[in-house]
Image (cartoon, grey):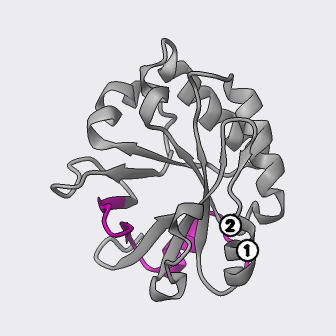
Amino acid sequence: MNKTTTLIGCDVSHWNKHVDISDFDFFIHKATEGKSFCDSMFRERANTHLNKKPFGLYHFARAENNNPIEEVDYYLQTIKPYIGKCAMVLDFEGKSLHHNYSGEWLEKWLETVKYLTNIPPMLYISESEYKGLKDYIPTNTPLWIANWSTKPQIDCVMWQYMTKPVDLDMFFGDIKDFKKLYNYLG
């Protein structure tokens, strides 16, 4: 991967209706949350940019409410047409971090997605929370690290560096690297 080249992207959901995705090199869109929520805009944006712009689809974990297998099943069923054509991402933050078995939950979710798709999903997590959970993260899991004050001090493929007016992200590599890393078949 070419770490001297960077791409600028955004991560969005239905809350960001007015963000023009075409202004960015890539985007990551919320697809699902827990085992029943499906973002109302992800399919439209994914279909519009399929084969035109690299993108990812993320799942917002609800480890405090559900088991990881139920959430993996729901996520993969929902994004099935896009598997192999985008980055798959687990967003692990909020209440999920404070669940009694958050590390085990995280590990099971990541390993199950990789086992079922043969593609390692990317993990979105803050740098401070990563330090407490790193022993549960499978080797070769691409990391997307949130740190809004300084560049992360850990090796990662992507960095969320700003949250206003929209979440902004820097991918360390070029478009070819992005597509290779996530088994893009376009």
* Membership of 35 in magenta stretch: no
Front one among 58 and 1: 58
In the figure, is residue 105 to the left or right of 9?
right
The image quarter containing residue 79 is bottom right
Q: Secondary structure beneath disc 1?
A: helix
In the figure, is residue 116 to the left or right of 154?
right
Label 1: few (<14), some or many (≥20) within 10 Å? few
Q: How far across and how far down the image is residue 98, in percent?
A: 42, 20
Front one among 164 and 27: 164
Amino acid type indicated by mark 1 = Glu
* Membership of 175 in magenta stretch: yes
**Distance between the Cα atoms at labels 1 and 2?**
6 Å
Q: Residue at x 40, y 73 (%)?
A: 173
Q: Please tell me how many numbered marks the rendered image carries.
A: 2
Front one among 155 and 94: 94
* Residue with the mark numbered 1: 44
Label 2: few (<14), some or many (≥20) within 10 Å? some
- Residues rendered magenta in the picture: 159-186
Q: Residue at x 66, y 65 (%)?
A: 183
Q: Residue at x 48, y 51 (%)?
A: 142
Please say if the residues under marks 1 and 2 sit with CB atoms less than 8 Å apart.
Answer: yes
Q: Residue furthest top?
A: 100
The image quarter containing residue 86 is bottom right
* Residue with the mark numbered 2: 41
Q: Secondary structure beneath disc 2?
A: loop
Front one among 35 and 135: 35
Amino acid type indicated by mark 2 = Met
Q: Is residue 13 visible?
A: no
